[in-house]
Image (cartoon, rainbow, N blue to C red):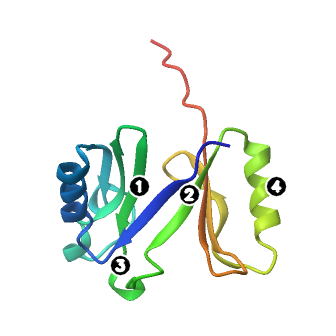
Amino acid sequence: MEAIVPYLNFNGNAAEALAFYGKALNGSILFQQTFGESPMEVPPAFRDKIMHATFKAGDLTIMASDVNDKDQVTTGTNISLSLNFTELDLINKTFEAMSEGSVITMPLQDTFWGARFGMLTDAFGINWMFNYDYPKEESKS
């Protein structure tokens, strides 16, 4: 398992927040995808919002996204702790163990972005994200 990464959720202003963090923390966005760039169906006004971004400043890594209108975030619910796994078996075991007494908000599943991913709020009210990136197939050229 790799280091815990904070995952911040925003009410439509993730791009603005990341630009601010870039300036204040002397960092940059390593990856950014909007909802419109994904295969998900979203309202037209939400297509330019951030589905996922990774920000880096020195050894600091922060991930971020906007949430849809029906899932507005408030202070205290706008952060999750993201666990990135290097072994498929370990993510399955850890998710199962952390599920005890939790509210599963997204069952552990394979995703369109090439990862096994799930989310839950544990019995103590802490939001967790679980991610395992499947190895990329080597180019056959």
SS class, disc 3: loop
In space, the residues marked 1 and 3 are separated at their CA atoms by 17 Å
Q: Which amino acid, by three-letter code, is at mark 3? A: Asn
SS class, disc 4: helix
Identify the residue position indicated by label 4 in the image.
Answer: 93
Which of pointers 4 and 2 indicates the residue nearer the eye? 2
The mark that comes first in sequence, 4 or 3, is 3
Identify the residue position indicated by label 2 in the image.
Answer: 82
In the rendering, which numbered label is found on residue 63?
Answer: 1
The mark that comes first in sequence, 1 or 3, is 1
In space, the residues marked 3 and 2 are separated at their CA atoms by 20 Å
Is residue 96 toward the left or the right of residue 136 in the image? right
Residue at image location 22% in from the left, 50% down from the top: 22
Percent position of residue 140, x then y: 50, 15
Tell me the quarter of the image containing the C terminus.
Answer: top left
Q: Which amino acid, by three-letter code, is at mark 4? A: Lys
SS class, disc 2: strand
Tell me the quarter of the image containing the N terminus.
Answer: top right
The mark that comes first in sequence, 1 or 2, is 1
Percent position of residue 139, x then y: 48, 19
Identify the residue position indicated by label 3 in the image.
Answer: 68
Circles 1, 2 touching at the beta carbon (< 8 Å) = yes
Q: Residues within 10 Å of mark 2 (few under 14, many from 20)?
A: many
Which of pointers 4 and 1 indicates the residue nearer the eye? 1
Q: Residues within 10 Å of mark 3 (few under 14, many from 20)?
A: some
Residue 3 higher or lower than 19, as above or below: above
